[in-house]
Amino acid sequence: MGTSEIVLERVQALLKIDTGTGSLHEHLVKLSRKLAEEKPGEALAQLETLSRHLKKTNFRGAPAQDEAIPIVADAEAEDCRLQWCGDIMELTRQPSDPTAAPKVLGAVQNFLEDSAMLRWAGVGFNQQESYHIGLSLRRLASETSSLESLRCWGKVLGTEGDYLVAEGVLKSIPKAPDATETPPILPDSPEFDVESRGEGANSFTYWVSAGGCAPWVRLPAARASHIVAARSMKRILTGRLDSPVLSMPWFPGKERHLLRAQIARISATCSLATKGWYEEDEEAGAGKIKQAEDPVGAFPGQEELASDAAWVHRMPCLNKIGKCSYPDVDALTSADPPLINEEQAKAISAQIEAEGDPKGILAGVDGDLAEVKPEGDEGNVVAWSYKVFGDKGMYKFGDADRTHQVTAARSMIWPGATTVTQGTKFANIYIGYATKCGSLLPANPVTGLPLISGTDPFSPLVPDDIMDEPDDLEEHDEPNPCEDDVESEGGSVDPADDEDA
C-alpha cells in the first residue's frame, strides 16, 4: 500500500468521526446532494448558508428542560382567585341566550349612575365593586321572571361576612273574577303575624348575597313578632343566615329572620323621596303610592333640599305590634258569628288609642322624633342631618338653570342610612351594622331628657362628665358630745348596777 493511499484512508477516517451531532463526511455528502438538487446559480456564494441550514436541521443536542411550572406560595388562594376571575367573566356575559329570544327584564336600577352620586357624599362603593353590583343585579333580574323592579338596598356589615341586599317588587298574584271576599284574619292566628305580599312591611321582597359573583338568596317575609322582638335587643350580625341568634331577651328565629326584621325597620324609617315625586294611589287602595304626573316639575329647589321641608317617607310606618295597620275591629265584631268577643275588641281598641294618630304614607320627615323632643327644644334632637357636596354654582342649560351639587340626608336614628340627590335624581342606600343609634334609648330617669346625641350605638350608656366637682357633704354634729363624756366618767353604764348598789 502506497503512502498516498494511507493518507487518504486517514483523511476518510478523520472525516467520518462522529462527535455526537454527525460527522463531517455526512455533512459534505448532504451538502453536495443539496447543491445537486437545487442547482443554485451562485453555489459558492450560498455554500455557507446551505451549510448552516443543514447543521440546524441535523442538530441532535441534549433534550430541552422540563416546562417551567410557576411556584405558588398559597395554592388554595390561587385556585380561589382563578375561580373568582372565571365567575366574574361569566357575570359580564349577556343574561340571554344569543340563539333564543331576548329576555324582557324588569326595571333594574342603573347602579353605576347612582354610585357616582353616592361617592360625592362619601358613601357607597368604588367603581369596580359598583360595576360588579350592577352586573349581579342584572343577573338576578334575568333569573327572576316575576320581577317588576329591582335596586340595590345597601350592605349590612357583620363580624364574619357582609350581606349585600337587593330590594325588588314582585308581580302581584291576580285574583279570580269569581273570588269571594276573604274573611278578616283573627289577631291570634299565625296568618295575622305575616302581612301579605305587597302590603305593609312586605311591600318589597329582599335578596342577600355575599357580593361579587356570589348567588342571591331570597329572604323570608317579615313577621310582626320578629319586628317586635328585634326592638328589644341589640345584636351585630355574623354574616351566616342559618346561625342562631343568642340574645336576651330571646329572639324567635334564625339570623335570616333577624336580618329581615331589621331591614323592615330601617326601610320604614329611612326610605325617603322628594316631596311631590309620589302621590297616593286611591285606585290601588290605602297605603299605596304612585309616581306623580310631573315629578320633575315639582322637584324642590336646591336650598330646600338641605332641610326637612323637601323630604317625605315613601313607606308606611310600623306600629307597636310590628305591622303597618291594626285589625279591623268592626269587621271582626260584625261577622256572623263574631270572630272576637267584647274583651278582645276593647283590648285592640286600647292599643289603637295608645298608638295615637299614625303617620300616614308620604308623611314629612319634620315630624320624626317628635315624641322624644322636650317642649321648647329647638335643634337639640334631630332625626336627619344635611350636607351639600361638590360644585354649588348655577349654570345655564338653555332656558333652565342647573347645578351639579350633591345633597345628602343622613339618618341620625339609623347610622348608615343615607339619601343622596343631584339635579332631579335621588337614591337611597344603607351601609351599616343594622343597629339603631344608642342615643335613642328611654329618657334619662333623672332629667327626663333624651340621652346625648351622637352616642356610640355599641356602647349606648353615656358616662358622667368627669370635670364636674362632687357635691359638698353636709356637716353634722357629733353623736356623743364632749359634755356627756365628762359626766359619765367614773359612773356605771348599766342602770341595774346603780339600783343594786
Image (spheres, rainbow, N blue to C red):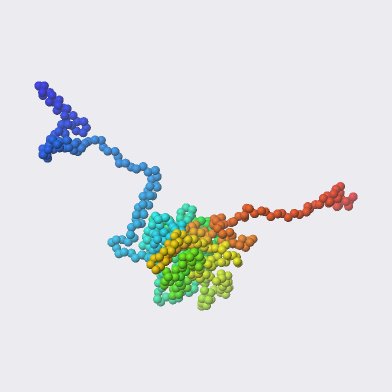
Visible in this render: residue 200? no
State the quadrant of the N terminus.
top left
Looking at the picture, how far across and down is residue 419, in whole percent?
A: 47, 62
Residue drawn at point x = 55 percent, y = 71 percent:
357
Extreme right residue here?
A: 501
Viewer-nearest residue: 379 or 53: 379
Count of numbered badges drawn on the protein? 0
Extreme left residue here?
A: 2
Looking at the picture, how far across and down is residue 304, in whole percent?
A: 48, 66
Looking at the picture, how far across and down is residue 477, in whole percent?
A: 78, 54
Viewer-nearest residue: 77 or 385: 385
Q: Give residue 421's quadrant in the image.
A: bottom left
Residue drawn at point x = 13 percent, y = 24 percent:
7
Visible in this render: residue 16? yes
Residue drawn at point x = 17 percent, y = 27 percent:
14
Q: Is residue 500 above or below residue 39?
A: below
Viewer-nearest residue: 195 or 374: 374
Looking at the picture, how far across and down is residue 381, in whole percent?
A: 56, 63
Viewer-nearest residue: 273 or 196: 273
Residue drawn at point x = 44 percent, y = 65 percent:
204
